[in-house]
Image: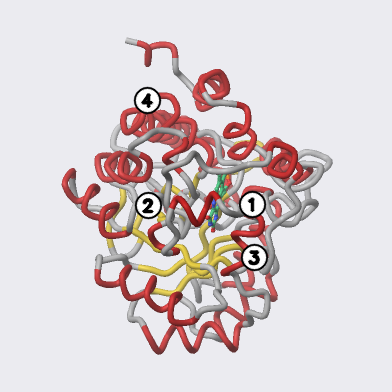
Amino acid sequence: SPSNKILSISDLEKSAFRTLPVGTREFYNSGATNQVTVRENISAFQKYRLLPRVLRDVSQVNTTTRVFDRDITFPLCVSPAGIQAMAHPDGELATSKACARMGVSMGISSFANNSVEQITAAGREVGPIDHAMQLYSMNDRKKEARIVRRAEAAGCKAIFLTADSPVLGVRYNEWRNGFQPSPGLAYPMLEKSSEDIQKQSHDDGFTSFNSDSHSWEKEIPWLRSITNMEIWIKGILSPEDVEIAIRYGCDGVLISNHGGRQLDETPATIDALPACAQAARGRIRIHVDGGIRSGSDIFKALALGAECCWVGRPMLWGLAYNGEQGVQLMLEIMYKEFKRCMQLAGCKSISEISLASLAVVRADGP
Ligand code: FNR
């Protein structure tokens, strides 16, 4: 079987690189301006080294952790990334099924090509699964509320309010390639038909609905008044913003720089994480995404204070490789690597992963 050749996330990335047309590939893989943060999200993990403890019984390793009041298989979920049907015709439906099969949660992008009703149902056909609905602050409050109500009715557990996108990042690739989703693809959550989408550039399309006059005060109390779902802020990097999220009664934050696609030259998320986790002091959930590409990356993020990690691009590469099975393969690779990492490091459960599991970081580290 072809999957024999795919052993790592890097193998999946190379396979997707060969499969996807250049415009799609660059839309998925690139970030803002000079790609500094895209690169650093990956390279920053190399500042940290693992410090194993030996001669511990690791025959019964428990990799599970609790997210949205459910034990998930291991501390990795799939971030909300838009336009998945360009990677594979099944798009988000395939991702949802793969997440359900592997027992992890999924974020649904506002730019999904399938509706929240279809995506949640596809996952539940396979098994129990929780979804979070990603939301942008929008000019049209009624439209924004419709997304929230539909997500809640479809059984989503949380809103992920993306806070790092008052405007879209500066993305040379999209402008150079005149990026457009394939004809025929719609954004049902944004109530945009394929015809609407083809009329505008991606950039103009974003500006047409997204609010750059958003604020904590405008968004959070309003969201709280219209939904009982958990409210998470996606795209925090500053410990000060963690404090504010706590003050506004948010349930969690996803430490994220949008995979380097918004403001370039922000810190790598793994570097921003420790101060944010310290500020939280257990008062709010701290998750992280950006550049997670292996089991040891997950391990490092947990050691530095995250409860759970999320991945964007590896899911897209899995989809491009082989749809639902490709996403499942991505999650299996991550799971096997993470479990072995725990065993080799001498950790029997997630709670045993701590700062003491990391060696002194390299000279260029904090
Ligand atoms: C994204 N991401 C994203 N985030 C969000 O809040 N709403 C969205 O619609 C999208 N869309 C999107 C499309 C594509 C192609 C990518 C690659 C990413 C960001 C995503 O949720 C996540 O933060 C990053 O992908 C995490 O970084 P890695 O794992 O891709 O390095």
| Residue located at (55% from left, 35% from top) | 293
Q: Does residue 56 appear anywhere in the picture?
A: no
Find numbered disc 3 in the image and state the secondary structure of the residue it sits on. Answer: helix
Residue type for callout 2: Met
- Whole-percent x, y for residue 138 in the image: 55, 74
The dot on residue 322 is 4
Would residue 113 appear left or right of 98 to someone viewing this image?
A: right
State the separation of the CA atoms marked 2 and 3: 26 Å
- Given this view, does label 4 or label 3 mark the residue nearer the observer? 3
Q: Amino acid at mark 1?
A: Ser
Q: Which amino acid type is marked by label 4?
A: Asn
Amino acid at circle 3: Thr
In the image, residue 313 lies at what x, y percent? 53, 39
Question: Looking at the image, can residue 170 be seen?
Answer: yes
Q: Nearer the viewer, mark 2 or mark 3?
A: 3
Q: Residue at x 80, y 52 (%)?
A: 265
Between marks 4 and 2, how big is the CA–CA gap? 18 Å
Q: Of residues 219 and 248, which is closer to you in this image? A: 219
Q: Are the residues tagged 1 and 4 within 8 Å (C-beta)?
A: no
* CA–CA distance in space, label 4 to label 3: 33 Å
Closer to the chain start, of discs 4 and 2, is: 2
Q: Quadrant of the N terminus?
A: top left
Q: Nearer the viewer, residue 224 or 295?
A: 224
